[in-house]
């Protein structure tokens, strides 16, 4: 899986900062390596969260199918699972990471 990511260097260029996916506030190329490591860790956390949320949902569905989980409690539990796994977060636009 590949992705294209725009990186801007320096805090003085507003146009590039607006169009970039990540902004590195210093002019050090070492920060690019740090950005890559942070992004790998973030991807790992997001994947764990998604898989954990799906697994919890499947367990809840099985419990509901077997009659151990009433519908109202199942609906509340599903909302808690969705919130806990990050599924309920919304964003008004792309988030920018400023490493500096």
Image: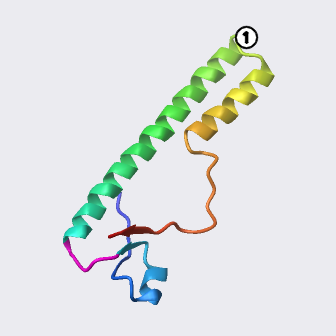
**Above/below status of 96 relative to 58:** below
**Above/below status of 87 relative to 7:** above
Task: State the residue at coordinates (47%, 69%).
Answer: 96
| Viewer-closest of 74 and 33 | 33
Where disc 1 sits, the SS reads loop
* The quadrant where residue 54 appears: top right
Pointer 1: residues within 10 angstroms few (<14), some, or many (20+)? few
Give the magenta range: 25-29
Q: Position of residue 99 (x, y in %)?
A: 34, 68
**Above/below status of 43 relative to 16:** above
Residue at image mark 1: 67
Judging from the image, the colouring scheme is rainbow
The C terminus, quarter of image = bottom left
Q: Where is residue 35 in the image (x, y as percent from the top left)?
A: 30, 63
The N terminus, quarter of image = bottom left
**Above/below status of 75 relative to 59:** below
Residue 89 relative to residue 70: left or right = left
Task: State the residue at coordinates (35%, 57%).
Answer: 39
Q: Is residue 75 magenta?
A: no
Task: State the residue at coordinates (70%, 16%).
Answer: 65
Q: Position of residue 21 (x, y in %)?
A: 43, 72
Residue 57 relative to residue 19: left or right = right
């Amino acid at each position: 899986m590949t992705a294209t990511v725009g990186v801007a260097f320096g805090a003085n260029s507003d146009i590039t900062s607006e169009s970039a996916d990540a902004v590195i506030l210093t002019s050090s190329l070492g920060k690019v390596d740090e950005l890559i490591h942070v992004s790998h860790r973030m991807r790992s956390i997001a994947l764990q969260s998604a898989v954990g949320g799906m697994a919890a949902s499947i367990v809840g569905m099985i419990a509901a199918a077997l009659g151990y989980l009433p519908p109202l409690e199942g609906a509340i539990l599903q909302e808690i699972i969705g919130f806990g796994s990050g599924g309920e977060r919304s964003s008004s636009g792309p988030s920018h990471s400023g490493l500096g």
